[in-house]
Amino acid sequence: MRDRGVADGRSNGDLATATATKIAAAVPSPHSLVPSLLASPHLVPARNALDGTDLIFTLNSAAQARAALGESVINATVGALLDDNGRLVVHESVMGLYRQLTPPEIVPYAPITGDPAYLLALTQRHWPQLTSSGIGVATPGGTGALAVSLRNLLEPGQRLLTAAPYWGPYATLAAENGIVMETVPYPAVGAPLDIAAWRTTCESILSAQGRLLLWLNDPCHNPTGRSLTTTDRHALLQMLRELTPLGPVTLLLDFAYLDYARNQHTVRAALDDYAAFGATGDVLVGASLSLSKAFTLYGARAGALVFPWSTDLALGAALATTCRGTFSTCARAPMSVLLRMTRDQSAQRALADEHAHWSTTLTQRADALNMALRAEGLRAAPWDGGFFVAILLDDSFAVAERLQAENVFVVPMNEGLRVGVCGLKVSDAPRFAAALRKCLVA
């Protein structure tokens, strides 16, 4: 998604708003131009055209700065789970294991592709019935997995497909690898997947470049907070299967929030559908996996790119080479934590209880926000799982800037506003909805 800017607007004078507004007003590209006075003669020309900031992190910092001044701030920008006092949630079941780690579980280099036992354990968190992780490598978080996939499954200048709206850093990842973003519409609330539009776009990409890489963030989609229906999922998978005579098709599932869903049975059903599809071998099916949200280990940067139903040794060698040529190896400590978790039934039960508690909390927050929006006569934002909901509207960057004057911070997207229910208290929902209605008519 290429972020659109807003015109210069009023500021209430504090540093937080000024900083956030400056970022929202950037040139609409992840490679926004910087003033020529900042150009470095040591950089190649293309690298002098980078802004170097991230909209989500900048808006979060702006909200925190405003709160530090004593203002009552609703910070719905953050992508981490917060309690009702604004404190970062930490799963004690995980940290208890982390504190038990011994030097050999922390200090030595991990293998370039990651500890095989770690890769299997992380894969089995999603598909317990599997006895192999297939072809895979450890990566620095799910973001690292996405980057590795681009490096090996597309050529520079080719097109990557995903559904819009999508997580903003997708565009940065694509741009950094010389890849062009192509989007198809995520289903509207209550509407079916536009399979005809998806098919047309997929066929166009395959015709132009002879291969297709689709990043699919499902279930618990960021930023909508919704999931594909069973009917839509089956239609999509059947369509991808039918396209394989046109060239190699890769479906990469981007998982991050599966432990925080309204209904875990629907998550399980989706994962089982993807497993059955991957096992046919018609389409190369892989997954971007992460411990960041599941274990509240955001800073540990523990993830993996796995293709559980593949035995392609050439694919494995290519992934390993990319790891060595970029980040070399990943941190061993979070791998060790996961392996300890697999051996500790008590810790597993405690973690399941923590996931259940915070899933209930997120459900309550999302439902409260949806109810408040409807009470104000605004578009509903239903939620199935994850840390966010999306409020679809026009002029989102201008609305987001006006919301800052109400001490409400959200992340604007081309399609609307991303609202982090992971940091939004139930009691904040009415104030949030009232502020949004006010800003929409401003």
Image (tube, rainbow, N blue to C red):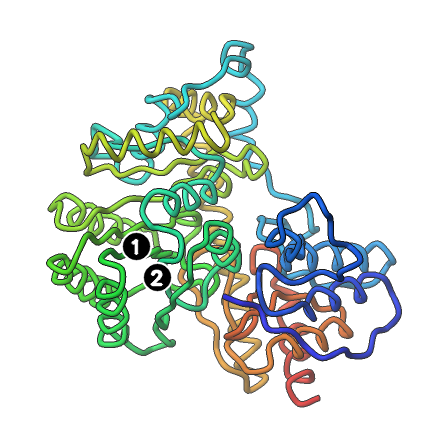
Q: Is residue 424 left or right of residue 63?
A: left
Q: In screen coordinates, is 89 left or right of 442?
A: left
Q: Name which residue lies at 80% across and 55% down.
A: 65
Q: Amino acid at mark 2?
A: Leu
Q: x%, y% of residue 151?
A: 39, 44
Foreground residue among 419 and 116: 116
Left or right: 129 as drawn, with respect to 435: left
Q: Position of residue 111 (x, y in %)?
A: 41, 19
Estimate the x, y position of residue 165 in percent, counting from the top left. 45, 68
Q: Quadrant of the C terminus?
A: bottom right
Secondary structure type for disc 1: strand
Task: Identify the residue under disc 1.
Answer: 213
Looking at the rendered structure, the kind of residue marked 1 is Leu
**For mark 2, what is the residue?**
161
Position in image of residue 327 (x %, y %) = 50, 31
What distance separates the C-alpha of mark 1 from that of mark 2? Answer: 6 Å
The count of marks equals 2
- Residue at point 32%, 33% (across, down): 318
Label 1–label 2 contact, CB within 8 A: yes
